[in-house]
């Protein structure tokens, strides 16, 4: 059931509407890098941030140490990198990272012992069940933000394509 919940929040149809992966469908690199205002996150940053937290939840489930994420740093990155022109290939790689981290998290949840679900995660106030459900909630939260950014972007003149 937890894998089903994760998948609905990430890429499967659900009554609640757009999931995280669906919110990224059709987004170009130029759209992904658009920032609504200085100091605000863009779609690209939200996608990579979501990848990172899938990695973090998987690491917690498996008891792995920090340091295995694809990018140096943690939580939020300024993307695309300063002074670098965004390419469709770079954006595609960011989306592939998100897909890969979702698959890895999914496998970790599939293999997680049900008997441990309600034990507290080490150095956390949350148990494993709450952490996994929280990962799905996190996807939906950012899917909503991305949908809002797309609406805001499309309401600006001239439209960003």
Image (spheres, rainbow, N blue to C red):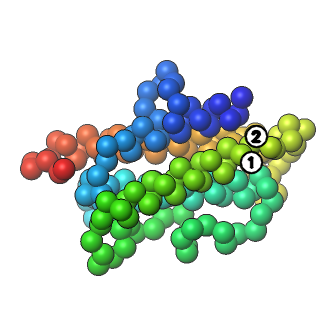
- x then y, percent, for residue 134: 64, 42
Residue sitting at the far front: 89
- Quarter of the image for residue 39 reads bottom left
> Is 6 on the left-hand or right-hand side of 90?
right
Residue sitting at the far left: 158
- x then y, percent, for residue 25: 37, 41
Q: Residues within 10 Å of mark 1 (few under 14, many from 20)?
A: some
Residue sitting at the far bottom: 83
> Is 119 on the left-hand or right-hand side of 74?
right
- x then y, percent, for residue 85: 27, 71
Q: Examine the rendering and report whether any part of residue 41 can be seen.
A: no
Q: Is mark 2 in CB contact (under 8 Å) with mark 1?
A: yes
Please, is residue 124 above or below residue 115 in the view? below
Identify the secondary structure beneath mark 1. Answer: helix
Q: Which residue is mark 1?
A: 108
Residue at 53% x, 43% y is: 139
Residue at 50% x, 26% y is: 13
> Is 129 on the left-hand or right-hand side of 76?
right
Q: Which residue is mark 2?
A: 110
Q: Examine the rendering and report whether any part of residue 106 can be seen.
A: yes
Give the distance between the C-alpha atoms of the residues marked 2 and 1, in whole angstroms. Answer: 5 Å
Q: Return the residue nearer the eye: 123 or 64.
A: 64
- x then y, percent, for residue 20: 47, 41
Identify the secondary structure beneath mark 2. Answer: helix
């Amino acid at each position: 059931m937890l894998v089903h919940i994760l998948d609905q929040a990430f890429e499967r149809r659900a009554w609640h509407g757009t999931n995280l992966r669906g919110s990224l469908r059709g987004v170009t690199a130029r759209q992904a890098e658009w920032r609504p205002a200085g100091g605000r996150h863009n779609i690209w940053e939200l996608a990579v941030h979501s990848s990172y937290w899938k990695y973090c939840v998987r690491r917690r489930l498996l008891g792995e140490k920090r340091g295995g994420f694809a990018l140096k740093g943690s939580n939020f990155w300024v993307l695309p990198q300063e002074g670098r022109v965004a390419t469709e290939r770079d954006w595609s790689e960011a989306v592939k990272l998100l897909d890969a981290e979702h698959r890895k998290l999914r496998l970790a949840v599939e293999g997680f012992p049900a008997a441990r679900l309600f034990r507290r995660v080490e150095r956390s106030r949350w148990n494993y069940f709450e952490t996994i459900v929280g990962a799905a909630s996190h996807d939906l939260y950012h899917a909503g933000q991305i949908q809002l950014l797309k609406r805001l972007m499309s309401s600006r003149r001239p439209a960003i394509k």
